[in-house]
Image (cartoon, rainbow, N blue to C red):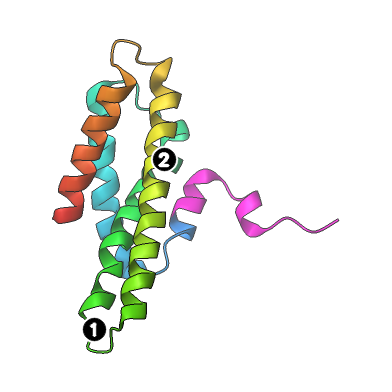
Amino acid sequence: MRPPHKSETQRPEEMLVYAVARVEDIPEIERIANGVIKVLKKFGGYEPEVDDIWVYRIADCTFYMKKIEYFLDAPTATEDTYSHVIDMQTKQQAMIEHAMQQLALSRKDRAEKQGEAQFVRKLREEIEKLSKA
C-alpha cells in the first residue's frame, strides 16, 4: 500500500495555496477568486467549505489561460508553440466549464429560485470580465 500523497492529507484551504506555483501570482488569483465569490454571494447560499475548491479551480485556470498567451508573443514562438498554447487553453477552458457546472450543481438545492443556466451565464460573464482585466 502506498503512503498518501500530500494533497490527499491536506485540508481544502491548504490545497488552494498549494496549487499556486509562485507567490507573486497569488494576488491576481485572489482577485479573480473574489470576483467569482461576489457572483456566488449575489445568488445567495455561498458556502466556502463547499464552493471554494471550485472557485479556486476557476481562478487558477483563468489566470493560467491568460498567462499562457505570453508564449505566443515570444520571439522564439513557432507553429508548434501555437499548437501547444491552443491545446492548453482548450484544456483550461474545459476545467473552468467543469468547475462552473459543479458550482451550479452544488448550489441547485441551496438556491432553487435561480435557474442553473442563469447562474452559469452570470458566472461566465464575470470570469470573462476578470480575465480581461
At horizontal 86% and vertical 56% (from top left) the residue drawn is 1
**Residue nearest the viewer, comparing 63 with 19:** 63
Give coordinates of residue 34: x percent, y percent: 26, 43
- Residue range in magenta is 1-16
**Residue 83 occupies which quadrant of the picture?**
bottom left
| Residue 85 at least partly seen | yes
Q: Is residue 37 magenta?
A: no
Look at the picture and state if 84 lies above or below 40: below
Task: Report crowding for label 1: few under 14, some 14 to 19, many 20 or more residues within 10 A (C-alpha).
Answer: few
**Residue 114, quarter of the rendered image:** top left
| Residue bearing the label numbered 1 | 74
Magenta span includes 15: yes
Relative side of 104 to 74, left or right: right
Residue at 44% x, 33% y: name it.
Answer: 102
Q: Which mark is residue 99?
A: 2
Residue 24 locus on image (x, y percent): 30, 69
Q: Nearer the viewer, residue 109 or 12?
A: 109
Q: Residue 60: in sight, yes or no?
A: no
Which comes sooner in the sequence, label 1 or label 2?
1
In x, y percent, where is residue 63?
Answer: 29, 58
Residue under the image location 28 percent in, 84 percent down: 77
Q: Is residue 76 above or below residue 86?
A: below
Residue furthest to the front in view is: 79
Which amino acid is tagged 2? Ala
> Which of the numbered marks, if any, corresponds to residue 33?
none
Which residue lies at the image location 27% right of the left edge and 39% below the top edge?
Answer: 36
Circle 1 sits in a helix, a strand or a loop, which is it?
A: loop
User: Which corner quadrant holds the C terminus?
Assistant: bottom left
**Around disc 2, counting alpha carbons within 10 Å, would you say few (fewer than 14), some (14 to 19), or many (20 or more)?**
many
What is the tally of numbered marks visible in this picture?
2
